[in-house]
Image (cartoon, helix red, strand yellow):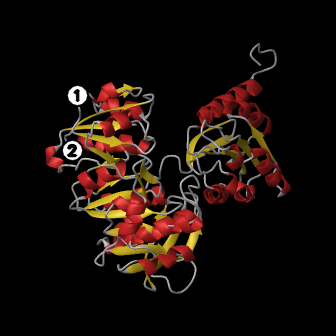
């Protein structure tokens, strides 16, 4: 393997950026692409810390535009170099920006002080903190939210930045006053001038790796390229830290060979695990289990979330939190009150006896796990899976076979056609017609339509009282969730209208 510094240099597109001064020398911060989920949260952290913050985006759209307005952060619509005159002390360039982006190019040409999102997070908010980083192909958002919550409930007041919003919390970030800062460690690239994964910037004192499976085919060449990124991340954990690994996943367990840090494993399969669960029971509210530490039963935990994957997420949190000084009793108290994450098996409503559930799942493995989890959580309902392949990775032809198998536990499957973007190679994109034919051949009737509007009447034709409509997308899916609820309510009202009623 290459030396870590060689790996980092190989992923930099080097141009001569001015040195970033210490945080105390910065007053005015400008974010290019401020309405993105991560960028908007970073803007909120800067505002909490007392900096003057402003930025621009192609369009100021809610919910982020509303949150930024509530913090008195000005948002300019559209991109224009004039927005950077007078020059801010720091320009943060979002990873959606290409080298020719008008504001990013101007910042480079004028030699303004620039950083990527992960560089800025590390420079301004991680110094002097115990950085706890949650990485992995799947489960990192929920696991990060769980870790934040149990630390909060135990009175540790961590700083945090999560790629999703916890139920009951207005924001996905906080500076916090405690020693910990919890970060969701994304393996996507940092900026056009820095192609390293974001998690390479986060200086982990402790880290969790939940899973490893090829993803982000738009930026990683193959499985070996993707796997190497995680090995380099594991090498960042210091000898006095802790690397927590999913012991049930051989590629994850192999990361132990790339670190000088102590390693603890968690899981449900095998005898050589440091942290595991016994007596797992599904409940109406989620699941209960006995936490086992180094072979000894310690406490019973009630987790208000269903699914094998969420049990694994909880065990990961237990492993790292115990190392950070929490007791088993504090873990049990924290999990008992965990409200869950928005867009993770989130019930959006019920109309005409059809339950509408929203989930962020988009990788084939996540789609499969989510369908199985909701089937187990609501066993009396027929699961109708509705999926939008819209991310750069999920639209790739390389995943056609995996998606064909991902819907086996659904009663019906509905897909929207992947969107075609201006720089797409058609030959590399998924053929949704091929996927639905394969899904159907495996025993789950499947249909595809161009978009959410075209899917809606088909869904109304097939959904019946008692069903569960599971809508999966990493985007808004054209507002399908609310449109479906409204249409179901109208259908119910029509059926309920008495004979002779002109509105029947």
Q: Quadrant of residue 347?
A: top right
Residue 256 visible somewhere in the drawing: yes
- Out of 163 and 378, give the one closest to the viewer: 163
Quadrant the C terminus occupies = top right
| Residue 232, image x, y percentages | 42, 69
Check the image and name the residue furthest to the top: 502
Residue at image x 65%, y 54%?
A: 378
Placement of 260 over or under 159, stated as above or below: below
| Residue 469, image x, y percentages | 68, 44
Give the mark nearest the N terminus, 1 or 2: 2
Residue at image x 71%, y 40%?
A: 417
- Out of 109 and 343, give the one closest to the viewer: 109
Placement of 193 over or under 320, stated as above or below: above
Say left or right for 384 vs 246. Answer: right
| Residue 65, image x, y percentages | 39, 31
Check the image and name the residue furthest to the left: 24
Residue at image x 36%, y 80%?
A: 262
Q: Secondary structure at mark 2?
A: loop
Few, some or many C-alpha atoms within 10 Å of disc 1 (few <14, some 14-19, many ≥20)?
Answer: few
Residue 464 visible somewhere in the drawing: no
Q: Quadrant of residue 155?
A: bottom left
């Amino acid at each position: 393997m290459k030396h870590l510094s060689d790996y980092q240099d190989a992923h930099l597109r080097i141009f001569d950026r001015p040195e970033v001064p210490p945080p105390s020398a910065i007053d005015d911060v400008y974010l290019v692409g401020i309405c993105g989920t991560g960028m908007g949260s970073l803007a909120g952290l800067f505002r909490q810390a007392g900096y003057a913050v402003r930025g621009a985006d192609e369009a100021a759209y809610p919910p982020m535009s509303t949150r930024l307005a509530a913090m008195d952060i000005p948002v300019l619509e559209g991109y224009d170099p004039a927005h950077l005159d007078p020059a801010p002390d720091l320009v943060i360039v979002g990873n959606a920006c290409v080298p020719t982006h008008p504001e990013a190019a101007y910042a480079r040409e004028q030699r303004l002080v620039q950083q990527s999102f992960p560089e800025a997070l590390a420079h301004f908010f991680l110094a002097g903190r115990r950085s706890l980083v949650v990485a992995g192909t799947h489960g990192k958002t929920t696991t990060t939210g769980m870790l934040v919550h149990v630390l909060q409930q135990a009175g540790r007041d961590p700083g945090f930045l999560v790629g999703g919003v916890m139920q009951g919390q207005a924001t996905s970030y906080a500076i916090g006053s405690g020693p910990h800062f919890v970060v969701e460690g994304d393996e996507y690239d940092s900026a056009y001038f820095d192609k390293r994964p974001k998690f390479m910037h986060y200086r982990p004192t402790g880290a969790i790796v939940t899973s490893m499976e090829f993803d982000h085919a738009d930026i990683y060449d193959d499985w070996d390229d993707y796997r190497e990124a995680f090995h380099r991340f594991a090498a960042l954990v210091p000898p006095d830290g802790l690397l927590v690994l999913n012991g049930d996943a051989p590629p994850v367990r192999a990361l132990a060979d790339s670190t000088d840090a102590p390693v603890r494993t968690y899981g449900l399969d095998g005898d050589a695990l440091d942290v595991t669960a016994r007596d797992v029971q599904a409940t109406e509210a989620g699941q209960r289990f006995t936490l086992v530490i180094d072979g000894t039963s310690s406490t019973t935990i009630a987790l208000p979330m269903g699914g094998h994957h969420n049990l694994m997420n909880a065990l990961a949190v237990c492993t790292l939190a115990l190392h950070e000084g929490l007791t088993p009793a504090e873990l049990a108290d924290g999990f008992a009150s965990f409200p869950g994450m928005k867009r993770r098996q989130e019930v959006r409503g019920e109309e005409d006896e059809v339950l509408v559930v929203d989930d962020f799942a988009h990788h084939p493995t996540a789609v499969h796990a989510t369908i199985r989890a909701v089937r187990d959580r609501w066993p009396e309902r027929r699961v109708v899976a509705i999926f939008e392949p819209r991310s750069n990775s999920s639209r790739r032809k390389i995943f056609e076979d995996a998606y064909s198998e991902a819907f086996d536990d659904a009663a019906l499957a509905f897909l929207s056609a992947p969107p075609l973007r201006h720089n797409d190679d058609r030959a590399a994109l998924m053929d949704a017609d091929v996927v639905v034919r394969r899904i159907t051949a495996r025993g789950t009737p499947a249909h595809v339509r161009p978009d959410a509007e075209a899917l809606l009447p088909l869904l109304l034709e097939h959904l019946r009282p008692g069903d569960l409509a599971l809508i999966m997308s990493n985007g808004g899916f054209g507002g399908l969730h609310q449109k479906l609820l409204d249409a179901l309510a109208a259908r119910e009202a029509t059926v309920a209208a008495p004979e002779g009623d002109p509105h029947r």
